[in-house]
Amino acid sequence: MTGTILFTIACLVVLGLLFSVVLYFVAQKFKVEEDPRIEIVESIMPGANCGGCGHAGCHAFAEAVVKAPSVEGFFCPVGGNATMAKVAAALGQEAVEKEPMVAVVRCNGSFGNRAKTNQYDGYASCKVMSALYTGDTACKYGCLGLGDCVSACKFGAIKVNPEKGIAEVDENKCTSCGACVKACPKGVIEIRPKGKNGRRVCVSCVNKDKGAVTRKACSVGCIGCGKCAKACPFEAITVENNVAYIDFTKCKSCRKCVAECPTGAINAVNFPTPLPPKPAPAATPAPAPQNETENK
């Protein structure tokens, strides 16, 4: 009996060694040599693996950028221009600097501006809430305030203001990775340029309802009146589906649209001084009375 057990064990050991040798030679025959530059580029990356670059992670990004003819079209939102400059240098190239971007919540429907019409008592998720019904206010387009974007952000750059009930972005922490954009079922978050000195102008509304319906749902909603588009000297504003949108590639931050908006749906961010009031129209001077002597 003991001899049989020992023989069985010996056979298993021999088979294990045989299979190991076969697998070794197969691995050697079919192994793929990885470009050593991939490891170098990956070591330069921040290691966030956030997917904001459009790839599955930092390693996938490194593989793609090494295999590409140039670094043009590649950008790491977490590392920014500094990281891309190092990546380009490691590959013997030069990187073109890109304008810093930031996530912008295009909704200003706080509790004071957008009253609740019902109470949601389900699972605390914007995605779940949006799938069940339009929301707990009369606006079916605005921020739901349950924090899917907060959970998606790996950098702690976004939170839901408990006093307002809408998401807010910390510009100093935001890497513009776009995770919050993907997480928002209402599509109220957009990646936009930070602007010169962090100053930018944006329509904080995505409501596509007609003006009267929008105004009833939110006191600061865009009613699609088009006054901002008419006031813009750079043709940076269009009104489609009853809501205005500012093209950041054309906007010069003159803020004329801010002054024209009757609902306050357009926000000017980080400007040091408030917008000057519109000048009152000049009064037409009354004609001077004629001298009686001259009349004679």
Image (cartoon, rainbow, N blue to C red):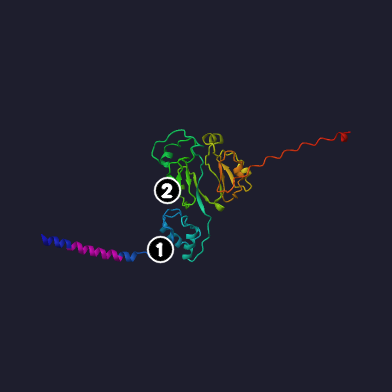
Query: What's the mark number on residue 289?
Result: none
* Lower sequence index among marks 1 and 2: 1
Above or below 234: residue 87? below
Magenta stretch containing residue 21, yes or no? yes
Residue at x 40%, y 63% (from the top left corner): 39
Neighbour tally class for label 2: few under 14, some 14-19, many 20 plus, Cα within 10 Å = some
Which secondary structure, mark 2? helix
Give x and y (percent) for residue 7: 15, 62
Quadrant assignment, res 237: top right
The residue at which mark 2 appears reads as: 152
Q: CA distance from mark 1 to mark 2?
A: 28 Å
- Residue placed most toward the observer, 58 or 150: 150
Above or below 236: residue 31? below
> Which mark is nearer the camera, 1 or 2?
2
Residue at x 56%, y 53% (from the top left corner): 197
> What predominant SS class does the magenta segment belong to?
helix
The residue at which mark 1 appears reads as: 39
Which secondary structure, mark 1? helix
Neighbour tally class for label 1: few under 14, some 14-19, many 20 plus, Cα within 10 Å = some
Outermost right residue: 296
Residue 112 located left or right of residue 282: left
Residue at x 18%, y 63% (from the top left corner): 11
- Residue placed most toward the observer, 247 or 27: 247
Magenta residues, as a range?
Answer: 10-25
Magenta stretch containing residue 257, yes or no? no
Amino acid bearing label 2:
Ala
Residue at x 17%, y 61% (from the top left corner): 9
